[in-house]
Amino acid sequence: MGWGGDHALKSALFLSAFASLGDLASRAYYDRKRAQGKRHNAALICLARRRVDVLFALLRDRWPDQHPVTHEPAPAATAA
């Protein structure tokens, strides 16, 4: 397949892409790849790569507005 690297990661990404075919946007992307003449497995690999690219962009752009975790103590409860 030409991905190299860890087989377990590749399998997880492939299965994730397969499971995402129920999503309309993922199915549309897969169908476009099939219409371009790609076989089922090749279209799934394209979909897996697209999903990785989206995840990377989310992390890179810190979306949705991730704030750093602060380790402030919780406010003390006052006795009434």
Image (cartoon, rainbow, N blue to C red):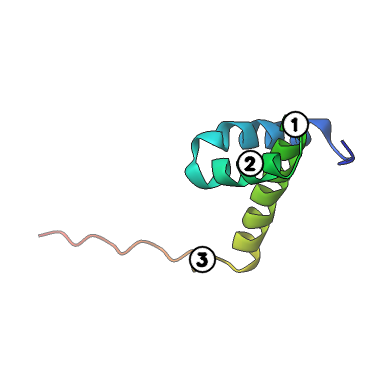
Residue tagged 1? 41
Say which element carries label 2: helix
In this rendering, the answer to whether 66 lies above or below 52 is: below
Q: The C terminus lies in which quarter of the figure?
A: bottom left
Please tell me whether mark 3 or mark 2 is closer to you in this view: 2
Q: Which amino acid lies under the numbered mark 2 shown in the image of this protein?
A: Tyr
Q: Residue at x 72, y 39 (%)?
A: 43
- The residue where tag 3 is placed is 66
Nearest to the eye among marks 3 and 1: give it. 1
Q: x, y percentage for residue 73?
A: 41, 63
Tell me the quarter of the picture where residue 54 sits. Answer: bottom right
| Along the line of sight, the residue nearer the viewer: 64 or 39 | 39
Q: Mark 2 or mark 3, which is nearer the start of the sequence?
A: 2
**Label 3 residue SS:** loop
Amino acid type, callout 1: Asn
Numbered disc total:
3
Q: Secondary structure at mark 1?
A: helix
Residue 72: image location, x then y, percent:
44, 66
In this picture, residue 49 sits left or right of residue 77? right
> Mark 3 to mark 2: distance in Å?
30 Å
Q: Earlier in the sequence, mark 2 or mark 1?
A: 2
Q: Residues within 10 Å of mark 2 (few under 14, many from 20)?
A: many
Q: Amino acid at mark 3?
A: Gln
* Image point (57%, 31%), residue name: 19
Q: Residues within 10 Å of mark 3 (few under 14, many from 20)?
A: few
- Find residue 61 and report its horizontal and vertical position in percent: 61, 69
Look at mark 2 in the image and give the residue it sits on. Answer: 30
Residue 8, quarter of picture: top right
Residue at 58% in and 67% down: 62
